[in-house]
Amino acid sequence: MNPLEILKPLFKEIKAEAKIIPVKKIVLHRWTRLKCMHGCEMFGKSWSCPPATPDFNEAANIISEYRRAFMIKLPGSLETQIKLQPLLLEMEKKLVSSGFYKAFVFFSAACGFCKKCSYPEPCRKPVMKRPTLESFGIDVFETAKKAGFSFSQNHYFTILLLE
């Protein structure tokens, strides 16, 4: 089955724009993680952010095991991105149950399932947590540009790895 057809109702529900892209269009840079480490208030405070996520080399190796991914343009503020996290997990789950067993979604913001993250204590909701794009070294803007997306201030992007 076509993965776009599987998720089309969910994309429509949240007014998201999605494109299937080859994984080779995902741009990785070490400086992206550097910005997490020096400039993001969530560094060292969330299981979805460094240093709790794979290092750059491991992240690059993981991504290289995929061929295609959804690049998704999500509407709304940072707070909206956190509210959309359950729906992103639902998208991943739908794809897995439809035969895309490697499907894996990234969050566009630090995990927001708990009021306060338990990091560095064990995660209270490990099945639900997902890393941010930047924690994997993904240059979100360059990747979105390569995928042909336009930019505006009221949108965020995420990636859902397919196969």
Image (tube, grey):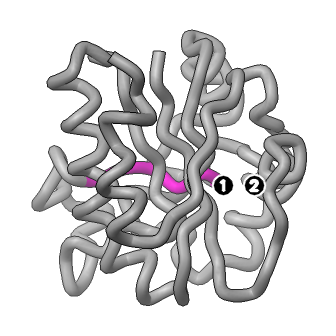
Mark 2: which secondary structure?
Answer: helix
> Label 2, label 1: how many angstroms apart (C-alpha)?
7 Å
Q: Residue at x 50, y 30 (%)?
A: 161
Q: Quadrant of residue 149?
A: bottom right
Q: Residue at x 51, y 64 (%)?
A: 16
Question: For mark 2, what is the residue?
Answer: 140
Q: Which residues are magenta?
A: 129-134
Q: Amino acid at mark 2?
A: Val
Q: In front: 115, or 144?
A: 144
Which of disc 1 and disc 2 is earlier in sequence? 1
Dot 2 crowding, Cα within 10 Å, few <14, some 14–19, many 20+: many
Name the residue that disc number 1 marks: 134
Residue 141 inside the magenta-drawn segment: no
Horizontal and vertical percent for residue 154?
A: 66, 87
Q: Which residue is depicted at the point 69% across and 23% down?
A: 23
Q: Is residue 48 left or right of residue 6?
A: right
The secondary structure type at the circle numbered 1 is helix
